[in-house]
Amino acid sequence: MNIKLLLSFSALLIFITMACSPKIVEKPTVEEKPKEVTPPVVDEKLSKCVKFFEAPNPDEAETAHVLYRDLLKKKNYEEALPLWEKAYEMAPAADGKRDYHFLDGIKIYKHYYGQTTDAAKKKEYAAKIMELYDEATKCYPDNAMIYTGLKGFNMYYTFGGETSKVDAYNTFKKVIDSEGKKSSDFILNPFSSLLRERFNNKEISVEEAKKYVGKVMEAINYGMKNAKTAKEKDRWEIVNGYAPALFEGFEAEKDFYDCNYYVDKYMPDFEAAPTDCDVIDLVYSRLRWGGCTDGNPSIAKVKSARDTHCKEDIGPGPTTSDLRKGIDAIREGRYDEGIGYIEKAIPQMSDPNKQAKYTLLIAKVYYSHKKNFSKARQWANKAADMRSGWGDPYMLIGRMYASSGPLCGPGRGFDSQRVIWPAMDMWQKAKSVDPNTASEANKFINQYRQYLPTVEDIFQRGLKEGQTYKVPCWINRTTKVRAIKG
């Protein structure tokens, strides 16, 4: 055999042998770490309370949820209740993103509350609803103040017989303390009403009342400025038409508001009628009552107009007379003192018309300055009795009634609108006894006619036009039902 061929064959044999031998893999010098397993992602936004997927039997919980919600849409509360109870017990937070079980439960118990006349049952249902609001707050804390506000709202409007006004007031206060200027519009009117009532009853201090009047006004200003949709704007208009008017009653409290408040509120009236003595006297007196001093430019301006246009002739007698002292005291904002002097002066007058004039002045002070409508009406009626054929006292009483919407209702709606009925009665009476008041009386009647309740409003309350009706609140007068035409 050829030696070269032999060598080539040997080399090929060695190569094949090496290729077919098992490979030896070297171990790493450093031990490799196993790959870490990523834990499942937990949605941090889900409620911390038990959810469907955490229930002992998720399918059963979700089935109960779907079935009761379908029954609720059909208003079948009787069949919905046991299924809601099962869903709520098994998974109170539902899917962890929606508060269905709390709000639906409240809806169901409200239905039962409205259906029963049993006092014990009513109390039980109200307590359950309050509990659901509290539980919703725990399970969905981001919405805590909404639930708390709704709780207070229902305490005030729905469950007044089962909850106290003090509890409702404190519930609203908690929301306002937390939310400040961003407080929801729906809590501000009932809170404002309770605030005024509790202050009048001497249940809260001047300091507390001032603090929360400021917070409510801040929230109204913020809400009016930032409302986007027509619906939001309308809701804030309702609040703005109620709370500030209600808070005018605090003007009767000395030093409740400062000089700037009175300047901002009353100087526009003066600027609109700078020669009208009634306006001048009112504005000057309010500024003085608010603590505005002689150095204040607004005081100087109004005083100059008074000296120029309003030199009242009160008849013969020294300037130290009771009448003179009374008028000066009222102009300077010392109302109680002024009323006292004029009360002493009236019996000394020989002219019945003059007696009537200053009796009506006392009525105006009680109405415009002291915000005591009952006392104002009492003195206005006295003035009318002193002088026959005089319509001014009735005109004043009509204005008191018409301005009582925020005192006797929510500012809008039937409860506030019905005060217009007795107001119109007074204006009609004024022009019937005194033709000199006819023009002004007709102006007020036409102005307020647009605010009468609608035919639907009175029909829903079982009323009809022309029917006798007694308006409650401080008015407490019998009148006739009227509705807006067209």
Image (spheres, helix red, strand yellow):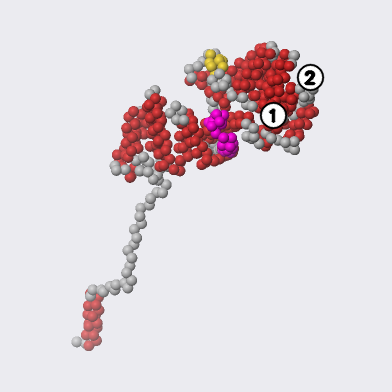
Would residue 199 be counted in the magenta stretch? yes
Is 247 inside the magenta-drawn segment? no
In which quadrant will I find the N terminus?
Answer: bottom left
User: Please, which residue is most extreme toward the left here?
Assistant: 1
Percent position of residue 214, x then y: 59, 37
Query: Count of labels shown?
Result: 2
User: Mark 1 Cα within 10 Å, few/some/many (few <14, many 20+)?
Assistant: some
Q: Which label's residue is closer to the chain start, 2 or 1? A: 2
Residue at disc 2, secondary structure: loop
Image coords of residue 126 (percent x, y): 41, 30
What amino acid type should be assigned to the residue bearing mark 2?
Answer: Gly
Q: Which residue is mark 1?
A: 334
Q: Is residue 461 above or below residue 185?
A: above
Q: Which residue is mark 2?
A: 315
Mark 2 Cα within 10 Å, few/some/many (few <14, many 20+)?
few
Q: Give the spatial CA distance, label 2 vs label 1.
A: 22 Å
Furthest residue in direction bottom, as rendered? 3
Say which amino acid is labelled 1: Arg
Q: Are marks 2 and 1 in contact (CB under 8 Å)?
A: no
Q: Secondary structure at mark 1?
A: loop
Magenta residues (range): 194-219
Which corner quadrant of the image does residue 215 belong to?
top right
Q: Front-most of 66 and 463? A: 463
Query: Can residue 279 be seen in this snapshot?
Result: no
Relative to residue 184, is residue 449 drawn left or right? Answer: right
The quadrant in which residue 476 appears is top right
